[in-house]
Amino acid sequence: MTAAVQLVAMALVAVFGTALVLTTEPKRQVIVSGPFSLSLIVLLTVLQAPDVVLSAVVVGLIGYPVMVLFALAKINSHQVEE
């Protein structure tokens, strides 16, 4: 049973990881990184790595998207000024 759950979780990570790599626009990458991060969190939970899950929640769902969106906003504001 646990092997099947692990296999499904790994397949989800593979699918969402592929979708993330194939996305070329940065704003869309931020959107696609959400489900990818959630799939990683599910996989790490299934693999019983709670300390890594906590780090993945903070970085994958909060830190990374916020920093990328701030960087994109800063780039756009510089382009408007010129």
Image (cartoon, rainbow, N blue to C red):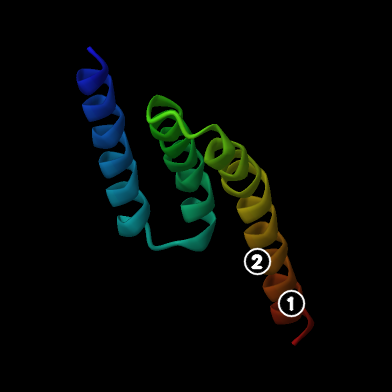
Distance from Cα at disc 2 to Cα at disc 1: 12 Å
Mark 2 vs mark 1: in front: 2
Q: In this figure, which residue is indicated by the disc labeled 1?
A: 80
Q: In this figure, which residue is indicated by the disc labeled 2?
A: 72
Residue occupying image coordinates x 62% and y 52%? 65
Residue occupying image coordinates x 68% and y 60%? 67
Residue occupying image coordinates x 26% and y 17%? 2
Q: Say above or below: 38 vs 21.
A: above
Q: Position of residue 75 (x, y in %)?
A: 68, 75
Q: Is 12 displayed left or right of 29 in the figure?
A: left
Determine which quarter of the picture holds residue 11.
Answer: top left
**Disc number placed over residue 39 in the picture, else none:** none
Q: Say above or below: 39 vs 66.
A: above
Residue occupying image coordinates x 20% and y 19%? 4
Q: Is 80 displayed left or right of 44 in the figure?
A: right
Q: Say above or below: 60 vs 27.
A: above
Q: Position of residue 53 (x, y in %)?
A: 54, 36
